[in-house]
Amino acid sequence: MTTYAARLISVSIDCNWREVYDFTAEPTNFPLWASGLASGVENSGDDWTAQGPEGPIRIRFSPPNEFGVLDHVVTVAPGVEIRIPLRVVANGTGSEVTLTLFQTPGMSDEAFAADAEWVQSDLHALKALMES
């Protein structure tokens, strides 16, 4: 069994968790706050496609649910999948959005730290959108 280093990256948002979930559960909204998908996403059957930082990617989002689960799997190359756990939960009358970032094999500590900063920036962009 193998486990990887992980970081939980979160942001508190002064907006009802259900509103945040409903917004983030819509794949076409991801490019509004997730900078790695700045080119937009297009539906291609059960999956979505987008232009990622290093080329075309395929994304499979979790189905809509009542639990705030927004997990998605990003395929960056044939056979290379990155699983991204993402949750929206109630935090008082607002919400908490948490993404689990894993340090994948071969990823340097510096790259892992840079990815964590990127995710934090994206979550702050989501916060700004939802609170405006």
Image (cartoon, rainbow, N blue to C red):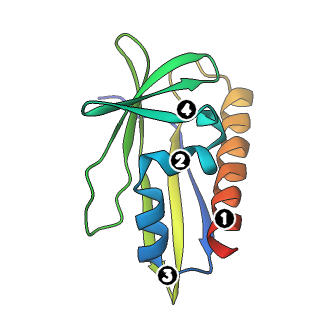
* Residue depicted at 59% across the width and 43% down the height: 31
Pick the residue in front: 61 or 44.
44
Q: Which mark identifies residue 103?
A: 4
Closer to the chain start, of discs 4 and 2, is 2
Q: Quadrant of the N terminus?
A: top left
Q: Callout 4, which amino acid?
A: Gln
Q: What is the number of the mark on residue 129?
A: 1
Looking at marks 2 and 3 on the same chain, the residue that comes earlier in the sequence is marked by 3
Nearer to us: label 4 or label 1: 1
Q: Earlier in the sequence, mark 4 or mark 3?
A: 3
Residue in the image at 52% along x and 64% along y: 97
Q: Which residue is mark 3?
A: 16
* Residue for badge 2: 30
Q: Looking at numbered disc 1 in the image, what kind of residue is underneath it?
A: Leu
Residue 118, by quadrant, is: top right
State how far apart marks 2 and 3 are (Cα). Answer: 18 Å
The residue depicted at 25 percent of the width and 30 percent of the height is: 45
Give how far apart the Cα atoms at labels 4 and 3 are: 31 Å
Under circle 1, the secondary element is helix
The reply to whether callout 4 and callout 3 are in contact (CB within 8 Å) is no
Q: CA distance from mark 2 to mark 1?
A: 11 Å
